[in-house]
Image: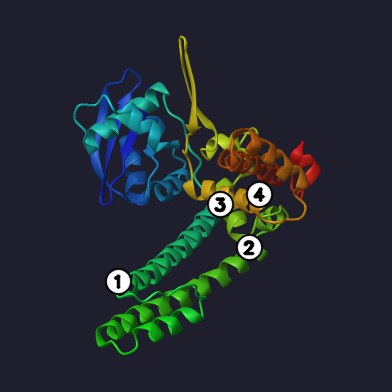
Amino acid sequence: MDHYAGIDVSLECSSVCVVDASGKIAREGKVSSEPEALVAYFGSLRLAVVRIGLEAGPLSQWLYAAMKAAGLAVELLETRHVRDAFKAMPVKSDRNDARGIAQLMRLGWFRPVHCKSLAAQELRAMLTARKLVQSKLRDVENHLRGILRGFGLKVGKTTARSFAVRIRELAAGQANLETIAQALLAVHAVLLREFNGFEKRVRMMAREHVKARLLMTTPAVGPIVALTYAGAIDDPARFKSSKQTGAHFGLTPRKYQSGQTDVTGRISKIGDAAVRTALYEAAHIMLTKPIKGCAPLKSWAMRIARRSGIKKAKVALARKLAVILHRMLVSATPFNAAAAAA
């Protein structure tokens, strides 16, 4: 008889439940959240486990890759679908979650998600670290501006080089402000140095990344946008159609239709927020800056802007860019303005 398993992954231990084809629980237990322990556990069951479900999470991709390499029939499940399936569960626990995932695997009520390659995960980690350092750098700058503003000292417009000089100039002669400025400027200097290091590294990665170089032939698509998109797509062949990428990254409107009610809402904002932000920024640059080589696309978006507003035009252009960039990856051809507009 075929059996189905569900794993609720936690940091230290994972709850495992195995059910048979009729839904009856055959095995339950706690296993260390290590690939070797999970592979050994399923090897010791001596049951025909035809599907194993793992909810996507921080540890899931690591466990999934190792279990897949060991020959286990494991599937990575979309978190949003699992959460919605468990809403009717009166008691939420790791044990009940594992039971629920096992039943989803038995019934086939799940949508598998793509497990990114190690290279894509490393690329995403680099971009995430760069973004974190950038946000903390801005936090320190804004905090310094806010402190000095409380004393009537206005920093005004500065550059990366002139910021520290301007802060010291304003704080001069006030002991407490000098102490605060000295400490925060020391932190600012470290963050700025590390951020510049990330910038150089990311641009070097973009030059060496074949897919990113191809994507950067598109106007308004720079190293950050290209690497973010290439890392999120990972394998272009996993999309049957390029049009699916717009919905995958949450750039298509929500739809609710029932009887006489038919409502089209705002964009869904599901999927990778970093990709959605990067595409929107590229669309913003394309519409607001004099960029060469994108006249047909810009004209198309401006017609939408005159009809529905500039914000909707930017979202529509971001969605169109998602489709165009995926088609470029599939066909391995550089950007063609005429084809993109068509």
- The type of residue carrying mark 4 is Leu
Viewer-side label of 1, 2:
1
Per the rendering, the mark at residue 206 is 2
> Which comes sooner in the sequence, label 1 or label 2?
1
Q: Residue at x 55, y 33 (%)?
A: 252
**Residue 150: which numbered mark, if any?**
1
- CB of mark 1 within 8 Å of CB of mark 4? no
Could you tell me the amino acid type at mark 3? Ala
The circle drawn on residue 278 is: 3
Using a 10 Å C-alpha cutoff, classify the residue at mark 1 as few (fewer than 14 neighbours), some (14 to 19) or many (20 or more): few
Circle nearer the N terminus (3, 1): 1
Which image quadrant for residue 227? bottom right
Residue at horizontal 31%, vertical 90%? 173
Is 19 positioned to the left or the right of 336 in the image? left
Marks 1 and 4, how far apart at CA: 38 Å
Work out how far the residue at label 1 is from the one at label 2, CA to CA, in angstroms.
43 Å
First of labels 2, 3 by sequence position: 2
- Alpha carbons under labels 2 and 3: distance apart: 15 Å
**Location of the N terminus (image quadrant):** top left
Mark toward the start of the polypeptide (1 vs 4): 1
Say which quarter of the image contains residue 319: top right
Mark 3 Cα-neighbour bin, 10 Å: few <14, some 14–19, many ≥20: many
